[in-house]
Image (cartoon, rainbow, N blue to C red):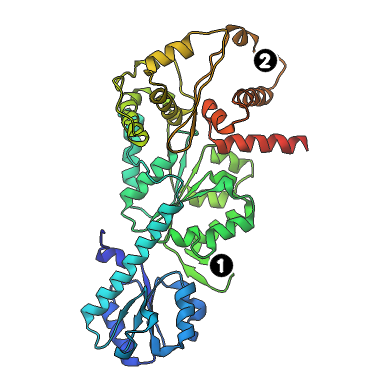
Amino acid sequence: MKLLNERQFLTFSVLIISRQPDVQVQFVQALSGLVSGLDTACHLEDKRKLLALYDLVILDVNACQPHEITQITSYFEGEVLLLLSDNELKSELIQGHYYLSPPFSRYQIQHAAKCALQRLIENQKYTALTQALKPHHQTTIVGNSEQTKSLRQQIMQYAPSKAPVLIEGEAGTGKALAARAIHEASGRIGPFVVVHCADIQSNAVATEQLFHHGGSLRLANHGTLYLDGIENISADFQHILVQLLEGRTVQSYGGSSSYLIDVRLISASSQGMLNIVRDNRFCKELYDRLSILKMNISPLRERLSDLRELFPYLTRRLCKQLSVPIPTWLNEYDFYQGKYNWPGNIREVINLIERCLIINKSPNDYWYEYMMQPSQYASKVMVTVSHHSEIPELHRTTSQTLMRGYPSDWSLKEIERSHIQKVVEFYDGNKSAAARQLGISRKTLDRKYKEWQSESD
């Protein structure tokens, strides 16, 4: 386990609760300069409503009743360090907690406090990891195009700052990858926590997800909060974020108190946020605060040379995930040259490689048979792989279908809706498979259907 350094401890706040003035003075002297916030109290009641302000509570068990100790250890979201006398060392209170008994030395006090705060961070990271959809996350930016080199340089420039970052780019370009890379390079000791804004359908859900016990904000303390699809948040949620960015203080769940938070915000959008602001669909004040640092990730069609490195890199990674041997066609990447613009971006490349691994066909052969040779027969293959995602095979399109097209008086929106519905129908209603074929996320596809439903109501 990597230990926190002295500079990192300066982001924490500590409360010392003891009836003994000499104990308070001793602990304050030992911890002064080690942490950023250091307060004392004689009784638990003195600070009960303000407990959420602290990361660590050093609690003299003589300063409160046994049931109060149980209460604080059950609902307090930080760590508790108990001060016990010799006759209390066999008490059930000490189970699962760090503790000290007199006489206290300066070294013992500092070491115990460091261990408790270290465990706080490790618990946050573990919780964030178990809540993530995927256990393994890539943080390597692959490719040697000028756009990718510039992106890597931006990441290293932005990483040391605490300023919010707004990342824009088409779906599948790697916005979450860039956000993780910024977090990893920042040296922040807390976890990388993801909030999918499109999944937040109401202000009540937003409040629950962000502020409840173990919520995203508290979980991301001393780390990074990644807001994916920032354009989807409601006006009230936007107001909450403005307050957070103003004072770095948030209201605890239930509104009984407020607490300081050390969270870096990275937000992402697949739409042009400035246009959304101009259309009065997003708060300009929040946009200005979220976009202090800004980056735009180029679509793959503007950096096709990256496929030279991306293709073998992604193939090796997928082989490891699927537990299959590396294929002989690892470096056959000439199939893309001048023929395709990859509307689904990197996500589409990954889907193609995974499909070829499963059907044991090189991308060149696959491309020739299924993309370049129209046939009167349409076919598809559906395979369930180890991580439970279904990988569809591209259906072959007939020349008759290509010639038929859509009525000339249809709007672009009507054409889009018709095409999406036909692809979903082709995959027998499997929206996940259809989304991969279309080169968009399942979330985007669901949003399209909700828009159409609201228009017809």
Mark number displayed over residue 253: 1
In percent of the image, x 30 and y 67: which residue is there? 9
Q: Amino acid at mark 2?
A: Tyr
Q: Amino acid at mark 1?
A: Tyr
* Quarter occupied by residue 328: top left
Residue 210 spot, x, y in % from top left = 53, 59
In percent of the image, x 54 and y 37: which residue is there? 272
Q: Earlier in the sequence, mark 2 or mark 1?
A: 1
Residue 33 spot, x, y in % from top left = 28, 74
| Relative depth, front residue between 89 and 457 | 89
Whether residue 39 is visible: no
In percent of the image, x 35 and y 61: which residue is there? 122
Whether residue 230 is visible: yes
* Quarter occupied by residue 262: bottom left
Q: Which residue is mark 2?
A: 406
* Quarter occupied by residue 125: bottom left
| Relative depth, front residue between 83 and 261 | 83
246 up-or-down from 457: above or below: below
Which quadrant, please, contains the C terminus?
top right
Residue 361 spot, x, y in % from top left = 38, 18
Disc 1 secondary structure class: loop
